[in-house]
Amino acid sequence: MSKNGVMFQYFEWYLPADASLWKTVGENAQALADKGVTSVWLPPAYKGQAGINDTGYGVYDLYDLGEFDQKKTVPTKYGTKDEYIDAVNRLQACGIDVYADIVLNHRMGADETEPVSVVETKGEDRTKEISPPKTIDAWTKFTFPGRNGKYSDFVWDHTCFNGVDYDERRDKNAIYKFKGKQWNRGVDRENVNYDYLMGANVNFEVPKVREELTNWGKWYLDTTNVHGFRLDAVKHIARDFFPEWLGKLRSDTHKELFAVGEYWNSEIDILTNYLEECGNCMSLFDVPLHFHFFEASNSGGEFDMRELLKDTLVSKAPCNAVTFVDNHDTQTGQALESAIQPWFVPLAYAVILLRPQGYPCVFYGNYYGVEAMNGPSFKKEIDLMMDLRRDRVYGAQHDYFDDPDVVGWTMEGDEEHGGDGLAVVMTNKLGGSKSMLVGAQHAGEIWTDAMGARKEEVVIDEEGYGVFSCNDGSVSIWTRRSGSEAGDAGEAGVAGDAGVAGEAEVAGQAEVADQAVSESQE
């Protein structure tokens, strides 16, 4: 039987640095599988420059998965190599694919400095040189003494990079481009050329660098047996690299190796152009959709809900879209801070989980809450939606994005999955109702709000339509009431009266003051 997929990002930025995450995710593997999770995205497993406090994005040694005493620790923030591999095995035993977070753009925490001839470049235009050539002491030599050549004797030095952001000799921060080198081509055009991001910037035009990264990729797959990758900061990496790198790894392992790239840009044409130029070798996170959620959640009800899916990756290239609500980078205090307001989080998850288009990714911080910041948990709501996605998001789909405030859609269901469908209606302003088609096969059935917000019952008419409602600033998900059978006239009569009362109640909501909306959004 076919099954709708759900990815789960099993970490958030502010987790305690207690080396416990690998154990925790292994212990929760079966519970995740039971809820319909089909893949888990785990954070970077290798040693970062900040040792046990490093989230993994300040990558130091790609070969140290919590095995060597480097950066004043053996385990990473999340645990040891053995615990990581055990977690992968336990997830796989429950039928869950594992995607590893891979950071290839930069290195940080070098073991030695090297004298390098450089020029400073302008921050807002990296192609403009703003200083004469000079020699700096750059942290560019990585010898990994704690690993002592195990797995690879490759030494990263200044010939592997094209820029840094710190001169030890003068104790000065700037963007230094190495003399005689150019920034990588085929990168995002922000800052004219957005190759440089942080640390020692990897030069993907160097053949020995590409060869080493391919050798490491093969080693990583052989060692961990993961099913694919989340690729960090792809907008900063030459776009001809990943087709080559993924192609070699897929050919060598004879595996599909799913990959999703983080290309942080809200312009849909830039994302679709990237997919085309890299030969659709990966999916991308749907950043435009995230920003629609962000705008809607902060607009005080003024966002036009008809535009919610317009110019998003899931609408333009659904087969390459990984949809998400929040992630570790959008959290409060992070560089890409754009967290969705709590009141809108259930609406956003309904959009990504209760529609078949795209590959939805559930964020740990939304699911369990962010303990360090007393952030709310939406586990109850997300669990319900994952159950419904697993069982009901099938069959014919009908969209009703035809009103600036109240929108909805239905799924008719199919026989392969029991025939049950659902109806979703939501608003970022005042509540209301919509007449929507759920299919003539559901005629006479009694449907109720699985979210519990609306108390009336809806009877599906003989043509397969029902009038479905939602409250102010909320989402309601309507499904067939347990025990409700088509053609049960007795129940239908009672339910019909309740449905009329419900419509009257909705009509009354049109006069609710804007204050009610504000309260629903707090």
Image: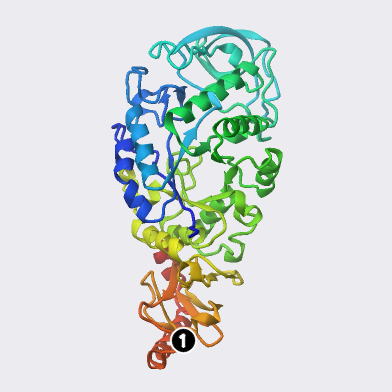
Picture mark count: 1
Q: Which residue is mark 1?
A: 444
The x, y position of residue 387, in whole percent, is: 40, 62
Is 400 placed left or right of 11 in the picture? right
The x, y position of residue 408, in whole percent, is: 54, 70
- Looking at the image, what colour scheme do you see? rainbow
Whether residue 472 is visible to the viewer of this picture, yes or no, is no
Whether residue 496 is visible to the viewer of this picture, yes or no, is yes
Is 382 placed left or right of 1 in the picture? left
The x, y position of residue 79, in whole percent, is: 32, 30
Dividing the picture into quadrants, the one containing residue 202 is: top right
Label 1: few (<14), some (14–19) or many (≥20) C-alpha neighbours in 10 Å: many
Q: Residue at x 34, y 60 (%)?
A: 380
- Which sits in the foreground, 413 or 126? 413
Q: Residue at x 46, y 23 (%)?
A: 62
Amino acid type shown at disc 1: Gly
Q: Residue at x 66, y 49 (%)?
A: 268
Q: Is residue 335 above or below residue 359?
A: above
- Which sits in the foreground, 463 or 284? 463
- Which sits in the foreground, 415 or 339? 415
